[in-house]
Amino acid sequence: MARVATPKLISCPIRLARTRHGADLRSNLDILPPNPANSPAMPTLLVLHGPNLNLLGERETQHYGRDSLEAIDQRLRERGRRAGIEVETFQSNAEAALLERIHAAKSDGTAFIIINPAAFTHTSVALRDALAAVRIPFIEVHLSNIHAREPFRRQSYFSDLAAGVISGLGPIVYELALEGALARLDAARKA
Ligand code: DQA
């Protein structure tokens, strides 16, 4: 009688990182080898910047610092490269474009999101719902301390869904968030 080979079990860090819940992480641990077509060589971390952040460096520097968005993005890509993670960055002034980018992240290998929703922090139920729908873990960042400014900035539609929130240290918040995301991905990979 012909013998049927037992499929080799392996772990897949990208699938693991898609969920915020420990139980789901464990249930995804052992899976059949992934289809190479759906398995990017490097996990992708997506950095989303909301409206007006394209003006960083010239806009209200007392709140947001003097670094340009491109300088921030470049540092993140470089740190990601050293960690073996592809960092993709996306800025838009349009809520719809940010929504579409989050939806696309569901199936493009994005393992983690860092988001500065900017003014949409305080207004956008739609972006909140998109992040909840794709169930990709995310860290919310703000260059300024949103709790030390006008009262309307204290309300965030994102914080209670976020894996973490970093607010108020200037441009370094993105790099701190990236370190947090890398630690999360590493922990999921080893779980
Ligand atoms: C911001 C804070 C928001 O209140 C503001 O609308 C922004 C930037 C920050 O990074 O500090 O545009 O998200």
Image (spheres, rainbow, N blue to C red):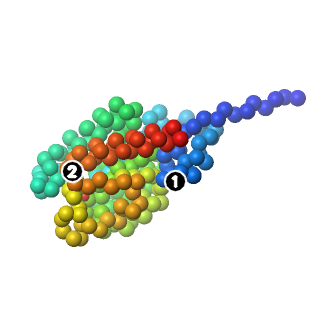
Q: Is residue 16 above or below residue 103?
A: above
Mark 1 touches mark 2? (CB < 8 Å): no
Residue bearing mark 1: 21
Left or right of 189 in this view: 58: left
Q: Position of residue 94 (x, y in %)?
A: 29, 60
Left or right of 176 in this view: 61: left
Left or right of 159 in this view: 55: left
Mark 2 is on which residue type? Leu
Q: Nearer the viewer, residue 137 or 179?
A: 179
Residue 169: image tag: 2
Could you tell me if residue 100 is visible in this image?
no
Could you tell me if residue 81 is visible in this image?
yes
Q: Is residue 68 above or below residue 52?
A: above
Q: Position of residue 82 (x, y in %)?
A: 34, 31
Q: Position of residue 12 (x, y in %)?
A: 55, 39
Q: Quadrant of residue 70?
A: top left
Residue drawn at x 44%, y 55% as measured from the top left? 103
Q: Earlier in the sequence, mark 1 or mark 2?
A: 1
